[in-house]
């Protein structure tokens, strides 16, 4: 019985050893395919899109400060006007009567003041000789002072009547073009708490502005001076240009959506742009032209954990990048370079593409360069790079690589058996089963991308 148990144990041990060797052999014979993209020159552009309304830079609403009937209009819609030009006149009959009444009151006050002045002069002389009582002198002085005040009041009323009469003639306050005429001849305008609108004058239609509402999520990258392109429905296919002139700090909240008004100057030499048009604008928040770029997914790429583990094992064994080969079956892998190596684990080595590494126990971190993986003759290896702006698809490469370098964007793992099946299936000399066609597998994924297989 004891001998039988020994044989059973020996058999199980043999099966386990064979299994481990088989698994290890399969793992050693894994094949790796790397999809790469070349570093090329391109442009990184970030845009902010919005809609806005075209307005004149300066527009003045011309009204009247007096009530009356519009007697005469001298300008109409689209009339060019100069500063000080007469635009309209109101009926002046009532205003002229007020002026005459004020003038009569002024003359009466002057006569009263002259009489009281003579009376005060006489009373003063008699009082100085003690010929009249002091009360009579005080009364004469009071009457004279009161007549002087009345004269001043009458003069003010007369001046006001003249001003009111002047308001009956409407003048242009600026040079410009009449955009709107709100009244007709014979219409009555009443000036009470609000000044009635008569004309709207735009100062210069060759210089317009666009008032655009920018969402709060985009306002952070909008700066004064940025280039802007926009179009209007009136001229499909035609682009107009401008620059960001002002970012107004006052928020506008509509149905819980917060926007900020951005003013964009828009030269209009041909006067094609008219006030009130809707503009579809594009603000070029960032523009980096003719710079080295690489796909953003190359930054996010990280090799397979098993691949990284074997690279770390080779690195710890002291193998240098020049001596390690790209064969997964031999257990040798290209190193990351002298001084550092990104391992697969999260404890000892930071993963490729990681931005920072925390010092053990100290709690203080230091920034590490962004890592990307490039393909070499020996396989792939990580390279630290410095990046600039990105548009979500591509990133600006500031330093670390040169034009034409191939960065890895994708890694595919396959066993040797699967690789062999794939090669046999792609052999054009193999017989084709009935009902099926031969297929050719391509090793290239795009115009500037390629795939390499490593064993």
Image (tube, rainbow, N blue to C red):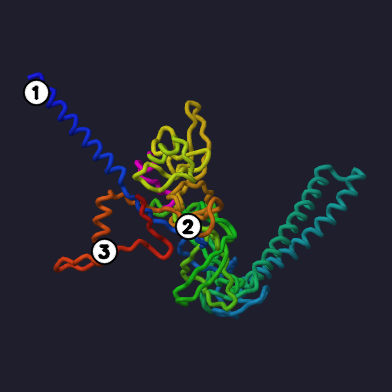
Farthest left residue? 1
> Is any part of residue 66 visible from this angle?
no
Q: Decide if residue 287 is on the left or right side of residue 5.
A: right
Mark count: 3
Tell me the mark number nearer the camera, choosing from 3 and 1. Answer: 1
Q: x, y percentage for residue 393?
A: 43, 57
Above or below, comparing residue 204 to residue 254 in the picture: below
Q: Which residue is mark 3?
A: 427
Q: Quadrant of residue 268?
A: bottom right
Magenta extent: 297-309
Earlier residue among tags 2 and 3: 2
Distance from label 2 to label 1 (Cα)? Answer: 85 Å
Q: In front here: 387 or 176?
A: 387
Farthest top residue? 2
Distance from label 2 to label 3 (Cα)? Answer: 58 Å
Q: Which residue is mark 2?
A: 214
For mark 2, give the secondary structure: strand
Earlier residue among tags 3 and 1: 1
For mark 1, give the secondary structure: helix
Q: Which residue is mark 1?
A: 4
């Amino acid at each position: 019985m004891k001998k039988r148990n020994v044989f059973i144990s020996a058999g199980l041990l043999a099966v386990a050893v064979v299994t481990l060797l088989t698994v290890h052999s399969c793992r050693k014979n894994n094949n790796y395919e790397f999809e790469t993209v070349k570093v090329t020159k391109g442009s990184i552009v970030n845009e902010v899109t919005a809609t806005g309304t075209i307005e004149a830079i300066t527009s003045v609403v011309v009204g009247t400060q007096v009530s009356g009937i519009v007697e005469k209009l001298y300008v109409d819609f689209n009339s060019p006007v100069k500063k000080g030009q007469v635009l309209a006149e109101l009926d002046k009959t009532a205003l002229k009567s007020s002026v005459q009444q004020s003038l009569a009151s002024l003359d009466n006050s002057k006569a009263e003041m002259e009489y009281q002045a003579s009376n005060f002069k006489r009373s003063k002389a008699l009082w100085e000789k003690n010929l009249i009582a002091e009360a009579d002198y005080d009364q004469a002085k009071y009457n004279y002072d009161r007549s002087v005040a009345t004269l001043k009041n009458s003069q003010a009323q007369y001046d006001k009547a003249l001003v009111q009469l002047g308001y009956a003639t409407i003048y242009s306050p600026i040079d410009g073009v009449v955009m709107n005429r709100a009244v007709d001849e014979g219409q009555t305008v009443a000036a009470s708490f609000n000044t009635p609108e008569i004309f709207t004058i735009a100062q210069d239609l060759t210089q317009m502005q666009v008032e655009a509402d920018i969402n709060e999520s985009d306002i952070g990258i909008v700066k004064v001076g940025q280039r802007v392109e926009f179009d209007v429905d009136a001229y499909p296919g035609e682009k107009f240009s401008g620059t960001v002139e002002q970012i107004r700090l006052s928020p506008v909240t509509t149905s819980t959506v917060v926007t900020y008004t951005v003013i964009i100057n828009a030269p209009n030499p041909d006067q094609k742009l008219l006030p009130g048009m809707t503009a579809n604008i594009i603000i070029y928040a960032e523009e980096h032209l003719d710079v080295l770029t690489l796909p953003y997914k190359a930054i996010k790429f990280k090799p397979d954990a098993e691949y990284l583990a074997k690279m770390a094992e080779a690195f710890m064994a002291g193998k240098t990048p020049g001596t390690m080969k790209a064969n997964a079956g031999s257990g040798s892998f290209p190193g990351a370079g002298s001084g550092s190596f990104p391992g697969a684990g999260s404890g000892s080595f930071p993963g490729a593409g990681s931005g920072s590494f925390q010092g053990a126990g100290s709690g203080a971190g230091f920034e590490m360069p962004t890592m990307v993986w490039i393909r070499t003759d020996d396989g792939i290896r990580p390279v630290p790079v410095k990046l600039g702006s990105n548009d979500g698809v591509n990133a600006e490469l500031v330093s670390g690589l040169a034009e034409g370098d191939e960065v890895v964007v994708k890694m595919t793992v396959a066993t040797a058996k699967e690789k062999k099946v794939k090669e046999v299936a792609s052999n054009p000399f193999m017989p084709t089963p009935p009902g099926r066609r031969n297929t050719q597998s391509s090793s290239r994924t795009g115009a500037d991308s390629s795939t390499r297989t490593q064993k």
